[in-house]
Amino acid sequence: MFINQIDHFITKHNLLPPTTKIVLGFSGGADSTFLLHFLAKKHQNGLISLIAVHLDHEWRDDSYKDNQFCQKIAQKLNIPYVTAKKSELNFTGKYNGSQEELGRKIRRHFLETVRANHNANYIALAHHLQDQQETLFIRLIRGATLTGLTVMRPKQKNYIRPLLEVNKQDIVDYLHRNNISYIKDPSNESPLFLRNRIRHTVLPALKACDSRFDVNFLTTLNRLKDTEHFLQNYTKKLFKQISYTTNNVISINLTKFFSLDPIIQYRLLMHWFEQKSVPFSPTQKFLDEVIRFFKQPNSKEHQIHQQWKLVKKKEMVHIHY
């Protein structure tokens, strides 16, 4: 039974250690409704502590009904429930202009706020196998790197995704068999969103070409993740060989840096910026700008970001902020 497969996946990736406190993003849709019921059993058995969290984006006049539906389910399962309207949040973050991206960032902001206020360990999201498929093709269309193509991970910082290898149809079938109601979001059918166009056009065509698509996709994705994991560890090893730390300042030796393949150079830069926790845009354009500065012999400083700059001294370069 696929419930046992989920438990195995959770154990394999250590997603729910004993007494873990979880904040669940609960929209009321099929995926999050299933995950709520799944986690509620562990909550009721004292294995974890669960809080259901719903954000009303206020994009529809009747969106308040979604909140009422979600609250009713949480109360029935005796799960603590937290909700808010988008207009009530003090969100000032930037986004790329799409409604989908704005909604995701506001939702993450709210979930992070609730997690902090309740001192929770993780935020659980109900992404499943088809979400991974859709995300990979979105990123492929937009020219992603290998890191981008490995899409979602079971555990990323404060986020966990227990359903990543679960088929959407298994979720829906489970809800129907157990007479569990859920919300059908009409926006999921709109062709205005790229994700929906991939969901309703690209993926069905691929499955029609070969019924083994779901299984083979997961196999390929896991191979990509294994490759990415190896390259991450290799990058960390190389970084130690080309960098020096003095008085908490990490400098890169440019001679050693340029002796390496350009593919590794990009990865080393990403690792460096992430290690220093500086804000940056992980685009090819940005990384190329950094390397151009490295190559200019007369340039000593470059204000590459409003909050920090690069400083060169002979063959060494460091971040100043």
Image (spheres, rainbow, N blue to C red):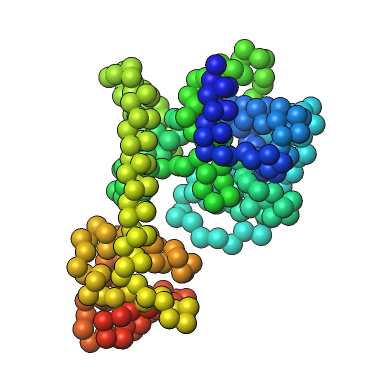
Question: Can you see residue 279?
Answer: no
Residue 296 coordinates in the image, percent (x, y): 22, 80
**Viewer-closest of 71 and 279:** 279
Asked if 155 appears above or below 221 in the picture, the reply is below
Quarter of image, res 274:
bottom left
Q: Is residue 57 left or right of residue 190?
A: right
Q: Give me the residue at 30% from left, 80% from top.
A: 316
For the view shown, which residue lies furthest in the top direction?
177
Residue 105 coordinates in the image, percent (x, y): 55, 52
Quarter of image, res 4:
top right
Asked if 144 appears above or below 16 in the picture, the reply is below
**Viewer-closest of 19 and 84:** 19
Q: Give me the residue at 37% from left, 54% from top.
A: 233
Residue 77 coordinates in the image, percent (x, y): 77, 28
Q: Is residue 267 left or right of residue 86?
A: left
Q: Give me the residue at 43% from left, 81% from top.
A: 246
Quarter of image, res 149:
top left
Q: Which corner quadrant holds the N terminus?
A: top right
